[in-house]
Image (cartoon, coloured by chain):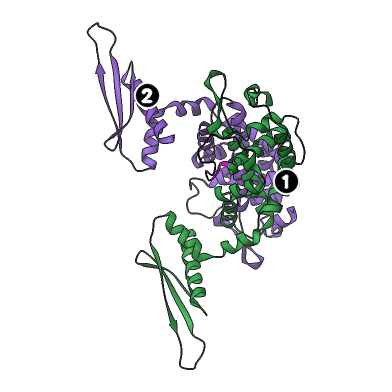
Chain colours: A green, B purple
Amino acid sequence: MLKRVIRSEKFLFVPDKDFKKNLKRLLGFLPRHYKLYQLAFVHKSASQVVFHNIKVNNERLEFLGDAILDSLIAEFLFHKFPDHDEGFLTRMRSKIVNRDNLNLIAIKLGISNMVISKTANDNHRSIYGDALEALLGALYLDKGYNQTKKLVGERIIQNHINLNKLLDTETDFKSRIIEWAQKNKRTIHFTSFEETDDQNHAPIFIAHLLIGDEIFGRGSGSSKKEAEQNAARQALQLIEG
Amino acid sequence: MLKRVIRSEKFLFVPDKDFKKNLKRLLGFLPRHYKLYQLAFVHKSASQVVFHNIKVNNERLEFLGDAILDSLIAEFLFHKFPDHDEGFLTRMRSKIVNRDNLNLIAIKLGISNMVISKTANDNHRSIYGDALEALLGALYLDKGYNQTKKLVGERIIQNHINLNKLLDTETDFKSRIIEWAQKNKRTIHFTSFEETDDQNHAPIFIAHLLIGDEIFGRGSGSSKKEAEQNAARQALQLIEG
């Protein structure tokens, strides 16, 4: 099957020493079928036309690698958070595999030096992340699932995913509801007020979160910020069920 | 790690002989850790509350199995259609793994008899497909990627996926553009007319496809149908880029 995937190999550029060196650095070994890996770095804008007018670039490998990466991150999160529901797991995964984050990881891995493209703007927001996914697709075809899992675990998850930081954004309910509102084109706003009692206790803050004109969340706390977070959490529970 | 996944096993129902028989029929073998597989059939509505108020049902396994299935179908299509681009692969995959289709496959596999739910409406459109994904998640945890791949290949792809039928819908550009319009809440319509020339050649049909008031596609053909298909194809190219 490999043959079919890389049957266009003779059309591809001859790799220079740097390519092989970079690839070895990325993978930890130099693969025998390195032409397959070369394809992973060919951006659509630098597509090579082969027989039957078929263009080759890294998009098919990206399709495959994207799915494999989703699986591997799903499995990682499944084990890492045994007590969290699938809504949490889904949100955490999308924070990890979103375009911007993957692109950043790809740049840190040095992939930006390896991509061949002819776009005016190499900073296109996902070009490197896409190449990273394509690289995983190539690795999967060449070495199978377990080797790909090993690489993703050791070189991506371990070095480039900060779970604590992701968890922080997860518990930032206010950001999440604002994100939700932007995505769903709804207007939301918070109102808050302070309550004090006659016995000189510390004031309590009360916040309401309105979507349109309707109150979707109420929260209280010892600060306005805390009250708003609690109101946002309640609204998210209503929305996300 | 398995221990953590099924630590709630003592809360689960005791499987009767039918469950084991059905499971064996589904998988082709009777797994040792069958309690993990039981969980795959527990719908959210029949969640079991375990310590710390944590509810267990099949949703976490479904999250995992969904990702694994996506990978396996991606790989299958990647090899099956070596000359098609990733847009085609993506569309074909979504036809295979969409809710309705997976649900139908699950019913054909007999999963509907195994699901435990307390919903008023067991015909909820994806309850069986979700359980099928959860079953794949359980199989993956128990036996690994390659065993899951084998099962998906032999019991799902081979028996329940009709590629020719899927390809027919793929080349039905008119249906695709109508589907797109419904999804994106746009109105489209076709206009067509016949052209004949003075030399008594066969008439040529010309069709235009309008989205709103604007022409998005032009097509010609020896029949009205062919002309409309060509107009729809052109519009799809514009839309999908």
Toward the left, the furthest residue is B198
Q: Which one is nearer the viewer's eye here, B197 or B111?
A: B197
Q: Which quadrant would residue B212 be assigned to in this image?
A: top left
Residue A172, how many percent across, how many down? 54, 65
- Element on which disc 1 rests: helix
Q: Is residue A120 above or below residue A90?
A: above
Q: Is residue A9 above or below residue B40?
A: above
Quarter of the image with the N terminus of chain A is top right
Toward the bottom, the furthest residue is A199
Q: Which quadrant would residue A193 be assigned to in this image?
A: bottom left
The answer to whether residue B6 of the structure is visible from this angle is no
| Amino acid on which the number 1 mark rests in the picture | Asp
The disc placed on residue B142 is 1
Q: Which one is nearer the viewer's eye here, A111 or B173?
A: A111
Question: Which residue shows up at 35% across the image and 26% down it?
Answer: B231
- Mark 1 belongs to chain: B
Q: Which residues are magenta?
A: A118-127
State how far apart marks 2 and 1 are (Cα). 49 Å
Q: Earlier in the sequence, mark 2 or mark 1?
A: 1
Crowd tier of the residue under label 2, counting other residues whose Cα lies within 10 Å: few below 14, some 14–19, many 20 or above: many
Q: Is residue A99 magenta?
A: no
Q: Is residue A119 magenta?
A: yes
Residue B87, how many percent across, how many down? 51, 33
Q: Which one is nearer the viewer's eye here, A228 or A54?
A: A54
To which residue does mark 2 refer?
B230
Q: Is residue B82 above or below residue B13?
A: above
Q: Main secondary structure of the magenta part?
A: loop
Q: Which one is nearer the viewer's eye here, B67 or B159?
A: B67
